[in-house]
Image: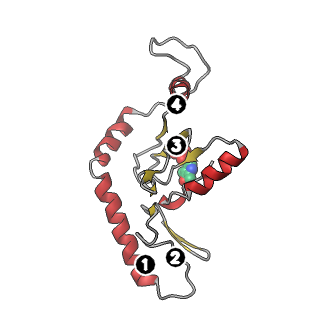
Amino acid sequence: MPTQLNGRTCDMDAMQAIADKYGLIIIEDAAQALSSKFRGKCAGTFGLAGTFSFYPAKLLGCFGDGGAVVTNDDEVAQKLFLLRDHGRNEEGEVVAWGTNCRLDNIQAAILNLKLKTFTKDMERRREIASMYDHALRGIDDLILPPAPDEDEKHYDIYQNYELGPGIVMS
Ligand SMILES: Cc1ncc(COP(=O)(O)O)c(C=O)c1O
């Protein structure tokens, strides 16, 4: 279960190699990485399923709690569909155990609105990360996150701009 932390997708070739070696399924925690990419492929789309958080502090935040799971697997999708709504199927019959994880309509409307500028907003985050990089690069005591485009395999969107050692800004 790789965690795509701070808006950076980890090296998914390395993850896949481990999964292949030990016969493991990959499920990504992409709560902090919506639209971040590794080798041009989005976080959350590498494994059997990927999860995203829409908590207010996240890249795409609503005004309360929210989230999403993506999968290409029909069976997993069907199970998730039941789990999120008390085990109710499309006919409204309870056919499995479930809980209430429905996305509230108001939160969905807020997310819909924010999605319109999402790509632009992520570009702005990358611009600001570049500014931090230029301003802080010369300070020897700081460990900076990789600059945008520093490594062509990664497209980072800086959920947090985390400085080391021991200083965290978000
Ligand atoms: C990496 C990571 N995983 C999971 C979560 C949990 O997301 P949520 O609060 O939407 O359940 C968060 C949010 O804090 C997170 O940053």
User: Depth check: 87 or 74 in front?
Assistant: 74
User: Depth check: 153 or 81 in front?
Assistant: 153
Q: What is the CA distance from the residue labelled 2 to the residue labelled 4?
A: 38 Å
Mark before the other along the chain sequence, 1 or 4: 4
Outermost right residue: 22
Q: Which x, y percent locates residue 91?
A: 45, 11
Nearest to viewer (mark 2 / mark 4): 4
Which amino acid, mark 4? Asp
Mark before the other along the chain sequence, 1 or 2: 1
Residue sitting at x 44%, y 51%: 41
Q: Secondary structure at mark 4?
A: loop
Q: Name the quadrant containing residue 129.
A: bottom left
Which amino acid, mark 3? Thr
| Label 3 packing within 10 angstroms: few (<14), some (14-19), many (20+) | many
Residue sitting at x 39%, y 50%: 60
Residue corresponding to mark 4:
73
Residue corresponding to mark 2:
144
Q: Which x, y percent locates residue 117?
A: 27, 52
Q: Name the quadrant containing residue 147.
A: bottom left
Q: What is the CA distance from the residue labelled 3 to the residue labelled 2?
A: 27 Å
Label 3 near ligand 1 (CB < 8 Å): yes
Residue corresponding to mark 3:
51
Q: Secondary structure at mark 3?
A: strand
User: Left or right: 124 with respect to 161?
Assistant: left
